[in-house]
Amino acid sequence: MPRLRARLVALRYLLATAWPIVLITAIGLAVAYQFVAPEPPRRITITTGSNSGAYYAYAQRYAVLLAAKGITLDILTSAGSHQNLERIEKGEADIAFVQGGIVSPAVGEDDEDGPLRSLGSVSYEPVWVFYRGAQRVDKLHQLAGQRIAVGEDGSGIRGLALSLLEANEIPANSPNLLPIAGLTAAEALQQGQIDAAFIVAAQEAPVVQVMLRSPGLRVVSLSQAEAYLRRFPFLSKIVLPRGVVDLVRDVPPRDTLLLATTANIIVRDDLHPALASLLLQAMTEVNGKGGFFQRAGEFPAYKDHSFPLSKDAEHYYKSGPPFLQVYLPFWLAVLVERLFVMVLPLLMLSLPLLKFAPAIYSWRVRAKIFRYYGDLKFLENDLRHHYDPARHQQYVDHLDRIDEGASVLNIPLAFSDLLYTLREHINLVRAELRRLATNHDKDNEE
């Protein structure tokens, strides 16, 4: 029982020492929690293009990779990049495919306060200009006065086609520029209903394959490709090698110079960093392989600067995926990252507090004893310098009160030596009091 009582006394002092540390740590925890990113949502939405286009195909492959990590990717089809931008600006989608060049870099890249960010480009999108006729065309101004399919209203291809034609003094309001796109344009060109068609699509797209293999149709090989790059910085120059479509039939019959824009992944700036990293990993897996026009590992990359690059993408391109996501399951990595944001400042705060905790604990115990020492010291000084025999009993009573208080003082066993030392010092003062009383009595007898 005495041992239990002693342990409870030690525990009481320990708790009295610990509660300020616990309080400060709790406040630090509350402050740190304000900087912890919330758990990422398990469902996000991407807006693509038509369900027969490359954007939709990419999104389907992203969805499979994200599903393996516990994230559901909902895919919305659309009329094109302009509708995709409208959706993401209104918050109807979290991610959007956007064709490069439909937004001026002067508007996008410097707009750091805007709600949209780029995760980078995922592929080249060749600008194919198919035409029919025996006369070779290598400059767009040669198409002046002809019937040209430039894509449907609101599509990215239409805006790009009109910009390229206007640069060749073919006005955008010309009645010969027809809102026809895709396979419809291919069929119209094959049947002679139009003379040329702009197509922006990957080489694997059915419409491109159909037109490349159609007798009587040719692709414009732009002899002025370098000039376009100076006037339209978001464009790139690519080469369709001779015979790459069909070696036996030698299609195309010569190297063909094409312009290319890029397919870009645009996100809202509030997309969770963990999801941005996961999406970038999916982009690398799906779009990082080599192809007709790209080297292996060339994509994803920040090629079109129409929108500012996301900070998460910038970190990914410099350092790769987050360390924890490489070695841990996605949700476990996210949990550890969130806890780390809280635990690190707590450790920085708690370690100094824990370092001083033993000193604080010792000070609290010693303070109990030092109070009696202070009282004892005042009494001793009074006796030495102002001893009054008439107050002898008051001195005795005062000393007894100090001794009684020290006797019932509950302190941890580890500090018992201090208590016994105090009582020895009380006895020394008691002895001094007796000596003073004896000397006074002797002086009176004499």
Image (cartoon, rainbow, N blue to C red):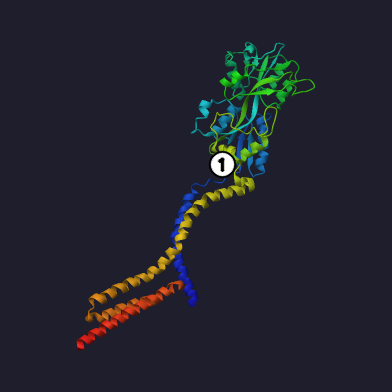
> Label 1 belongs to which residue?
273
- Residue 105 position within the rendered picture, expressed as x and y whole percent measured from the top left: 53, 26
- Residue situated in front as seen by the camera: 229 or 209: 229
- Residue situated in front as seen by the camera: 360 or 31: 360
The quarter of the displayed image where residue 91 is located: top right
Q: Residue 438: tell me if it is visible.
A: yes
Q: Looking at the picture, which amino acid does disc 1 mark?
A: Pro
- In the image: residue 389, left or right of residue 20: left
Q: Secondary structure at mark 1?
A: helix
- In the image: residue 252, left or right of residue 79: right
- Residue situated in front as seen by the camera: 336 or 75: 336
- Residue 233 position within the rendered picture, expressed as x and y whole percent measured from the top left: 57, 24
> Which residue is found at the position 44% from the left and 56% from the top?
24
Q: Residue 172: tell me if it is visible.
A: no
Crowding around mark 1 (Cα neighbors within 10 Å: few <14, some 14 to 19, many 20+) is some
- Residue situated in front as seen by the camera: 127 or 438: 438
Q: Looking at the image, is 440 positioned above or below residue 15?
A: below
The quarter of the displayed image where residue 307 is located: top right
The quarter of the displayed image where residue 436 is located: bottom left
Q: Looking at the image, is 193 positioned above or below residue 66?
A: above
Q: Quadrant of the C terminus?
A: bottom left
* Extreme residue in the right direction: 248
Q: How many marks?
A: 1
> Which residue is found at the position 72% from the left and 18% from the top?
254
- Residue 384 position within the rendered picture, expressed as x and y whole percent measured from the top left: 26, 76
Q: Looking at the image, is 259 positioned above or below residue 135?
A: below
> Which residue is found at the position 62% from the left and 28% from the top?
262
